[in-house]
Image (cartoon, helix red, strand yellow):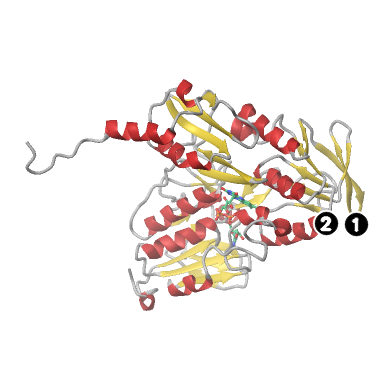
Amino acid sequence: MSTPGAFGATGHSCVIVGASAAGVAAALAMRGEGYGGTVTLVDADPHLPYERPPLSKGLLGEGEDSTGLVPIQPAPVYDDLGIVLRLGERVVGIDPAGLSVRLSGGDVLGCSRLVLATGVAARRLTTPGADAANVLSLRDAADAVRLNAQLARGGPLVVIGAGFIGLELAAVARRHGIEVTVVEAQPHPLASVLGPEVASLLTELHRGHGVRLLTGVTVTEFLGSAAGVEAVRLSDGQRLPAATVVVGIGVRPRTELAASARLDTDQWGIPVNEFGQTSRAWIYATGDVASQPHPHLTARGRLEHWEAAQRHGAAVGSTIGGSPVRYTDPPYAWSDQYDTTLQIIGRPRTGDDFVLRQGAEPGRFLAFWLRRGRVAAAAGMGVARDVGAVRRLIAGEVPVDGLALSDPGLDLRRTLKQHTMRHTVPTVRKGAA
Ligand SMILES: Cc1cc2nc3c(=O)[nH]c(=O)nc-3n(C[C@H](O)[C@H](O)[C@H](O)COP(=O)(O)OP(=O)(O)OC[C@H]3O[C@@H](n4cnc5c(N)ncnc54)[C@H](O)[C@@H]3O)c2cc1C
């Protein structure tokens, strides 16, 4: 690896737009591969790059991070590795002919490689009143500060959307005794991700903690004054009083910059090949904004989770650094709710065989989706011990028996070990007969 003094000496330079999970991982991996050119991370957010998952878990003083943001890396790491941070600055243009980007302050940075790690933005409602001061979403540190201040005043809280963030917020608010109603247009929470069986266990979990979870309804009207929303009207006519409303109805990819440079974009984001290259070979896209041809997706799409962003970023960084890497691991996501964690590996598909381990209860279950006699995806809550084995069963495409999997007595680690032993070619020792 190059010494710090040599950074930038090669004539190569890389600008990474977006200093979050994917962008930072890309920068670190480039240096890990010995990339000696200038590496500049630009982010519109003014803070030292920070982790987003604690933003929803650390509200109201909860979680590991009750004092501030959790940095992705301590500040000296960037200096030591010769990674230049341009924080609080937005990239406003890409010049494909000049191989450069333009920053909001007017600076132009030349770059022989460009990485777009611009992530996603929270989707907003267009219902009149949705722009009121107490109708919030949660994507970054500034959102978290606003939401924290609102929640500290007490409830009732209305959460629109029973996705990962909506459910996490409901759990945090309930722990603080705040009255919470979650409004979901689909028949179940996380229905599109996990299917009805697992979703109904989550429903029970939240209702058991006092969340009012209303499904199959939408918001038709925000009621109140210019000072703020006081209630929410639903499609079934109900009126829900609200001191705070959080909208968690999904995200949209931040593709504006890519589109302005005439890069291809699609319904999911910026399409990339298996190495993260966009329709212009010198420009890469990574993390949540990338529309990836991942083997666990039916076609291509976004993998909107921390580990996927981080690993895809690292793969792109290694590729730019000279060691091409494909990101093909089964996607993994987690979500903390109350005192337990939901973990999801792989992506269930319509047509998979569903197996729920016997004895499932809200807050403690393990479910599998089987495809061609292999575990293609799994979701568990309160079963962290088993997750490592499940990940290896999926990655190793180990043949399994659905009936056996439903038995809570089945030792998954042993199943894995037996398979590994059967498929390991015995090594022939020198001199053996
Ligand atoms: C509140 C919250 C909780 C989460 N919890 C979990 C969890 O528990 N488990 C899990 O698996 N995942 C979780 N996630 C998802 C995970 O954090 C994301 O998948 C991950 O952050 C994606 O990283 P990214 O680098 O692709 O994009 P982002 O994190 O979206 O970062 C993109 C960055 O690009 C910057 N940017 C965009 N355009 C420009 C521009 N033109 N110029 C300069 N900068 C720009 C933005 O300011 C932003 O900092 C959570 C996300 C949020 C918001």
Give how far apart the Cα atoms at labels 1 and 2 are: 7 Å
- Considering depth in this image, is 184 or 382 the residue closer to the camera? 382
Quadrant for the C terminus, please.
top left
Instruction: Tell me, yes or no, whether the two marked residues, 1 and 2, touch with CB atoms within 8 Å.
Output: yes
SS at mark 2 in the image: loop
- Is any part of residue 295 visible from this angle? no
Whether residue 255 sits left or right of residue 419 in the image: it is right
User: Under tag 1, what secondary structure?
Assistant: loop
Q: Is residue 55 above or below residue 35?
A: above
Mark 2 and ligand 1: say if the CB distance to the nearest ligand atom is below 8 Å: no
Q: Which mark is residue 227?
A: 1
Residue at the far right in the pictured view: 225
Label for residue 133?
Answer: 2
How far across and how far down the image is residue 35, in percent? 36, 66
Q: Residues within 10 Å of mark 1 (few under 14, many from 20)?
A: few
How many tags in the picture? 2
Identified at 71% across, 58% down, the residue is 144
Q: Which residue is drawn at 49% across and 42% down?
A: 385
Quarter where residue 425 is shown: top left
- Where ligand 1 lies, by quadrant? bottom right
Neighbor class of circle 2 (other Cα within 10 Å; few <14, some 14-19, many 20+) is: some
Whether 273 is drawn above or below 49: the answer is: above
Depth order, front residue of 14/22: 22
Residue under the image location 51 percent in, 25 percent down: 406
Please give the label number shown on residue 394: none
Q: Quick one: label 1 or label 2, which is nearer the N terminus? A: 2
